[in-house]
Image (spheres, rainbow, N blue to C red):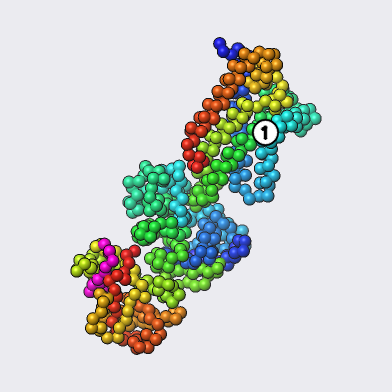
């Protein structure tokens, strides 16, 4: 066997985390992207900048603030204790929440671009043909933005897989709970287990390359997005 | 159909200020670009909200700022055919056609797919995707899609301007046929006087955001003869021709007209400018123009620096234009007889 059980556990956890985050962001990011693509409100600038923040912030900064917010004195911590969910830091769901923030722009920006590319006309046509805004969204905007959804989902998934700093800040390093593949590699290197680090790193590298390759091959004509 | 519009809309530097009452089944809105036609269309369809005023369609308000009524576009049942066909690229022709049909309340549906497909000759295209259609096919499908939503009113916003010249006039019969066959009143928006004359029975003329006149397309064409570089365009419906000494002889007004210039030997609609008709007081002994028609002057009208002469040629009407000097020399008066000379090359097929 190439990878030992701890490695496999880390990979499984990574896949689970990335999948959950992608699904949540599809639900959360779509309305945000739709709003950003269509609004003429002054708030578009500030909200758009906030969504993009994780692109430039060091993960440790984001992780630090999230840790404070999730802590017993933070607003999220207060909320979770009131709801009797228990504290979020160093749990899988704490990691999920942090990753949702961290990967938000990777979902929102491709979606926003593809919504903007659709333009006003198809939705106006749909409206004059009797489609309500919600109906037009599902019957026209969603199918036309399909390539955007695919790109956004892949980017989000892959980016969550590649996360490291935020995981360390929020999740720590608990096997099976928060120890994802990137952290596992770090651990191997710390323990001078270069062989194992190599194998896991190679798996990550090949996975990332295949994901990106698939994305480029699948979309020969980006104009359609 | 009765349309009452009274609205005010400010858009940047542009103000649309309209008070318009029209009734009829084929209404035209005519004006140059920038006259507010498109703003008016989007206000009618509900895609743009006027600042104030009201819009009544057959007496029922679709917008009324004082009564705080502003029906959403999907509730107005006013279909719109755009300049660009606007077919949904992810749906095939059939699904495009049925998009509005499926969203129309069952009780209100009165037009069926098969019928529309037959009239528009698009039945063979059902499985195709929009990207595989030609410009004319796309526009016919877009028209069919609008019709199938059983609208109370069909808006056509420059539906022909994206098409090539020869295609444009082949679509017009479909537009009229569909409106008559399915009894859907329409508002046809265009900057083309010729399209107005082919499509509309009443024309509202817009200029710089205000209504300047409501008249018949014929009146509008005569009024604009003096300022239009192409004069007044006579429209002639000509039957099947016969070949005669390298020219084509088309039956017309009991006699015939000789045409040249690569005219194909098919019946059709032809245009002839008022500038291409030469008037002679007496029969010229010999003339190069191949058509020499005895006419009676039915009417005279002045427009700009020109005088329009309405001629009666064995029952058919032609309009010629002359300058006042010529009018004096010819001594044209209503009822006088005169000869009209027209070159065989002056006709142009639409």
In this view, which residue lies farthest toward the top?
A: A1
Quarter-of-image position of residue A14 = top right
Asked if the stretch drawn in magenta spans residue A222, the answer is no
Instruction: Please report the residue visible at 48 percent of the width from the left and 69 percent of the height from the top.
Output: B204
Residue B132 image offset from top left, x and y in percent = 39, 45
Q: Secondary structure at mark 1?
A: helix
Closest to the observer, A80 or A183: A183
Instruction: Please report the residue visible at 49 percent of the width from the left and 69 percent of the height from the top.
Output: B205
Q: Chain of mark 1?
A: A
Quarter-of-image position of residue B48 = bottom right
Asked if the stretch drawn in magenta spans residue B257, the answer is yes
Residue B113 drawn above or below residue A148 = below
Closest to the observer, A14 or B291: B291
Residue A82 drawn above or below residue A138 = above
Residue tagged by mark 1?
A: A101
Residue B247 left/right relative to B12: left
Instruction: Please report the residue visible at 43 percent of the width from the left and 59 percent of the height from the top.
Output: B161
Q: Which residues are magenta?
A: B252-264
Residue B278 image offset from top left, x and y in percent = 32, 79
Instruction: Please report the residue visible at 61 percent of the width from the left and 35 percent of the height from the top.
Output: A106
* Residue B315 seen in this snapshot: no
- Image quadrant containing the C terminus of chain B: bottom left
Quarter-of-image position of residue B288 = bottom left
């Amino acid at each position: 066997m190439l990878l030992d059980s701890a490695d496999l556990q880390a990979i499984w956890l990574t896949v689970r985390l990335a999948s959950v985050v992608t699904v949540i962001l599809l639900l959360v990011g779509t309305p945000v992207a739709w709003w950003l693509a269509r609004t003429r409100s002054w708030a578009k600038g500030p909200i758009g900048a906030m969504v993009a923040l994780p692109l430039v912030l060091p993960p440790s900064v984001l992780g630090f603030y999230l840790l404070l917010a999730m802590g017993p004195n933070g607003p999220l911590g207060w909320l979770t204790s009131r709801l009797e969910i228990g504290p979020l830091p160093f749990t899988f769901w704490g990691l999920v929440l942090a990753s949702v923030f961290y990967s938000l722009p990777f979902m929102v920006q491709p979606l926003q671009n593809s919504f903007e590319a659709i333009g006003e006309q198809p939705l106006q046509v749909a409206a004059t043909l009797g489609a309500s805004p919600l109906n037009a969204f599902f019957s026209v905007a969603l199918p036309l933005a399909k390539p955007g959804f695919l790109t956004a989902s892949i980017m989000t998934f892959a980016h969550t897989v590649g996360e490291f700093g935020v995981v360390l800040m929020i999740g720590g390093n608990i096997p099976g709970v928060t120890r994802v593949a990137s952290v596992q590699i770090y651990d191997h290197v710390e323990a001078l287990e270069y062989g194992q680090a190599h194998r896991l790193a190679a798996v990550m590298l090949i996975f990332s390359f295949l994901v990106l390759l698939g994305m480029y091959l699948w979309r020969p004509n980006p104009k359609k997005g | 159909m009765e349309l009452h519009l009274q609205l005010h809309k400010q858009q940047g530097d542009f103000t649309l200020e309209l008070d318009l009452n029209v009734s009829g089944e084929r209404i035209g809105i005519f004006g140059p670009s920038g006259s507010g036609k498109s703003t008016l269309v989007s206000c009618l369809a509900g895609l743009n909200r006027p600042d104030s005023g009201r819009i009544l369609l057959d007496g029922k308000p679709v917008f009324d700022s004082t009564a705080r009524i502003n029906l959403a576009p999907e509730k107005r049942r006013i279909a719109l055919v755009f300049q660009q066909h606007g077919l949904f690229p992810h749906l095939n022709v059939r699904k495009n056609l049925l998009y509005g049909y499926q969203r129309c309340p069952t009780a209100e549906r009165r037009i069926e797919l098969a019928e529309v497909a037959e009239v528009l000759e698009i039945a063979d295209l059902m499985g195709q995707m929009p990207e595989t259609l030609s410009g004319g096919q796309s526009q016919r499908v877009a028209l069919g899609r609008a019709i199938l939503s059983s609208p109370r009113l069909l808006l056509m916003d420059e539906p022909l301007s994206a098409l090539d010249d020869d295609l444009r006039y082949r679509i017009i019969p479909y537009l009229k046929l569909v409106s008559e066959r399915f009894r859907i009143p329409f508002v046809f928006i265009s900057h083309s006087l010729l399209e107005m004359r082919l499509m509309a029975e009443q024309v509202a003329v817009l200029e710089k955001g205000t209504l300047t006149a409501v008249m018949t397309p014929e009146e509008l064409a005569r009024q604009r003869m003096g300022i239009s570089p192409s004069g007044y365009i006579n429209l002639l419906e000509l039957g099947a021709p016969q070949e005669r000494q390298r020219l084509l002889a088309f039956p017309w007004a009991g006699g015939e007209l000789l045409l040249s210039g690569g005219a194909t030997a098919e019946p059709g609609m032809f245009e002839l400018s008022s500038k291409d008709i030469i008037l002679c007081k007496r029969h010229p002994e010999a003339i190069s123009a191949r058509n020499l028609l005895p006419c009676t002057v039915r009417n005279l009208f002045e427009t700009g620096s020109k005088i329009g002469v309405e001629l009666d040629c064995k029952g058919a009407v032609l309009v010629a234009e002359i300058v006042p000097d010529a009018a004096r020399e010819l001594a044209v008066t209503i009822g006088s007889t005169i000869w009209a000379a027209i070159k065989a090359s002056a006709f142009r097929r639409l």
